[in-house]
Amino acid sequence: MSLDYTNDTAANEALIKEVLDQYPEKSAKKRARHLGTVKTEENGTPTCGVKSNIKSVPGVMTVRGCAYAGAKGVVWGPVKDMVHISHGPIGCGQYSWSQRRNYFTGTVGIDSFVTMQVTSDFQERDIVFGGDKNLEIMIDELDELFPLNNGISVLSECPIGLIGDDIEAVAKKKAKDIGKKVVPVRCEGFRGVSQSLGHHIANDAIRDWVFEKGTEEEWATGPYDVNLIADYNIGGDAWPSRKLLEEIGLRVIGSWSGDATLAEIERAPKAKLNLIHCYRSMNYICRHMEEKYGMPWIEYNFFGPTQIAASLRKIAAAFDETIQKKAEEVIAKYQPLVDAVTARFKPRLDGKTVMLYVGGLRPRHTATAYEDLGMKIVGSGYEFAHNDDYQRTATYLKEGTLIYDDVSEFELEKFIEQLRPDLVGSGIKEKYSTQKMGVPFRQMHSWDYSGPYHGYDGFAIFARDMDMAINAPVWGKLKAPWKAA
Amino acid sequence: MPQSAENIKDHISLFSEPEYKELLAQKKANYECRPSDEKVNEQLEYSKSWEYREKNFARKQAVINPHKACQPLGAVFAAAGFEETLPYVHGSQGCAAYFRSHLARHFKEASACVSDSMTEDAAVFGGLNNLVEGLLNAKHLYKPKMIAVSTTCMAEVIGDDLSAFIATAKEKEAVPTDFPVPFAHTPSFVGSHVVGYDNMIKGIFNYFWDREKGEVKPGKSNGKINIIPGFDGYAVANNRELKRYLDTMGVDYTLVGDVSEVFDTPTDGTFRMYDGGTKLDDVRDAINAKATIGLQHYCSDKTLEYVASKGQATASLNYPMGVSGTDAMLMKISELSGKAIPEAIEKERGRLVDAIADSQGWTHGKKAAVFGDPDFVLSMASFLLELGIEPTHCLCTNAGKEWEAQMKALLAASPFGADCQVWAGKDLWHLRSLLFTEPTDMIIGSSYGKYLEKDTGIPLIRLTFPVFDRHHHHRFPTMGYQGALRTLVEILDRIFEVADASSDISYDLTR
């Protein structure tokens, strides 16, 4: 269903030059490596040709966050039956408190803790004397107040690493004391260049402090057992995804980490296959399970009917004919819904242009979903992608598409001004400046408080939301009538 | 199939569909290894008990759902209120991203702030190079008139010296020597955002009065009054309301750190990164004012001390809300400026009193829990007392003994304050216990209170920062007589909603 089109390479390259000219020389040189267009190499492979996962230029408004944001905000925070300690000063925990809409079931403060902010609230004396002793006391207090917790994570903020606290030693000791898993995560915000290292560190903590520490749970494995990995259940995304996987006959024995319990993570190595959605944030642990337990993994994409069908077929191909047959049935079952959604919204969205700028996955994964609705991607980029992400991206995007890695607000605004897309999909920090320019916008981290967007059920919502953004009457009201030319 | 193209269900209704209910029930039963419902209910009930409350209050280290943010947020907010000023965070970039998101989520506005992205190497060698390069880039790209630098906890732990660093950056021509780069050290492990606000305002005064051209002595009085509003999520409307009062009174003034324009720019096809704000020349001249008033004591303590050291008269209030809060502000301004309070304002006051009199039968004897920043809780409690509402729990995570004493004195002056308990340094998980064991009719605070509302069933009235989950509250004032009126309406609406929902018989058309 996807469209065939190309973007204007020459115009985009000129635009990049124009933007770089505004920088001091040294920074212009650095930034030049992160801006480019999709090209086809001589051997026929498409490439984005940008460098990534490098330190941000000082003094610009980078949209990036930090390792803590990646580890706590993304990977560990959604694990619902554990108490997550933001270990350090007050701010990091406060700003990330309940901001990612990781939906879950359970009773908050009793057996689920996702929407709570638990912090050691470091004071000056803790910086001087260290926070380990108090962390021990804190873990006892939390276990006393929340006895139905199944474990505790300790996510370190900047000062912890700088003052040399030994949270690993505390974790070992307290795990014994309270008889539950205590997971130290060394995700100080100054580590690495973005959230991305935080994801990696969080994955390593699963390896070292969950898998390595074992589980007492008995688990009878079946031939169709899979894990749904790296879906954080934003606006409930993991649930329509789970529904589809179950409909084709698979058993989702663990869901990470949106709506996850610790048990679901612990049992993961007993599945037959890992299905990974956000490759950037959790490929590390999938690779580990592959090496250590021989478990294969498959990337999938549940945005938009083209990719959903392709992914269901790819997943089914890893199993027997029963599953493959069911996958076809499921695709056929939802086709009328897809047709109806497309019939309703495509005429309203056909030919509209989109610029994306999101984390480490959505700039490529959502591209085809837009195209399913007749829309064109004219620019795309990532906050914290690595080179392998950009390789994957080139196959999703069309020739000439403007690519921007770790784009600064300055660059993004200029690109938006010049390309004047019909829609920008990015985050809260970019939302309001874009809308003031008169350009429709959707937050693509949080689905602008809508969603889910995954699966067939999510596609209908996605289509509706893009239509409501682009075709809102408000965009006709920007100029006062007495000013209109 | 629950979804259809004609009737698209999103998360609000989709997951109540039978298919999803079944899916979630199966997940829980087969894979989650959850405690039994019986155990969950038992713990839930226990968490509402006095015994749990005592355990909860016995904790010494764990902080659970605190109501405060860290210093640099306040510094960034303060800096945003000056003419074409770019807030600059020296330290990790993640912090700046958090500050920008936090302010954007409340104001539904873009929030500009750069950082110099310090990482591991800066942790070892210090962040000087980051600052030099950062100032150069920031000046080039965003063309500000001033860059106001604050620190993160990382920069503080490694001990970066901003004064020396900025001097070096100027030597290296990152910015011209005469380009204003005020700064404030704002460690996140000391105080909270209100202290950061204070530090940055002081830092900006200090730059223009002591650093730009060496020490400046106050000259001939410019006849103005300086007003420092303080950290205020309602600053957009409150600052405008304040200016209306001052203009009506004919007072010449400088509103110091005025964010009302930058956090409320129009949608008309152009994005304005800078808009409004206190003119830098006015800040230079502020040393010659007749007096400086801080509208929030806990947001301007150190600044006022500094201003006083220059020989200027100072005064501080506690967030002018309600009848007497506004009275006190107007009288203080009148006293310091020598301008009378005109009849038009007195009539506004009369209308507020009229409104309170009309509604007092509905407010009298109701109980309220209040939480938020120290000045807000003080003034909110004071207004409640005027309405005949009994503040029952007044809680402030970022307050200490001074505030506690001030609260107790306020409460002691009214029979409606007799049963009130004051909780300095406590968090919202403490408040949860308080509300279960000693319930109130309403909770007044920020959006974070919605979890308390959900757990206890006590209605939440959002009247302070942050309000993430309701739109446009900050576009209407809470300060002054008009603000009090609006606050009264918010409280009354909830009281009437509860009354209407409580009885089919007393479902009165006229109240």
Image (cartoon, helix red, strand yellow):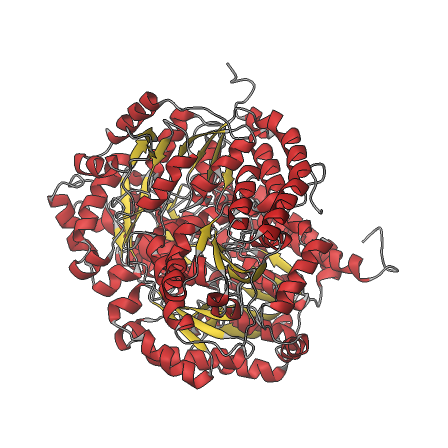
**Quick check: B10 left or right of B137?**
right
Q: Is residue B93 visible?
A: yes
Q: Name the spot of residue A18 as percent of width and height, x first.
A: 28, 26
Front residue (pair A475, B493): A475
**Residue at image location 58% in from the left, 46% down from the top:** A455
Q: Observer-nearest residue: B40 or B354?
A: B40
- Number of numbered labels in the structure image: 0
Q: Position of residue A238 (x, y in %)?
A: 56, 54
Residue furthest to the right: B505
Percent position of residue B501, x then y: 78, 58
User: Quick check: can you spot residue B245?
Assistant: no
**Residue at point 52% right, 34% down?**
A370
Q: Using residue A136 as the reference point, say whether residue A440 is left or right of it.
A: right
The residue located at (54%, 76%) in the rendering is A218
Check the picture and name the quadrant holding the C terminus of chain B.
Answer: bottom right
Q: Is residue A92 above or below residue B435?
A: above
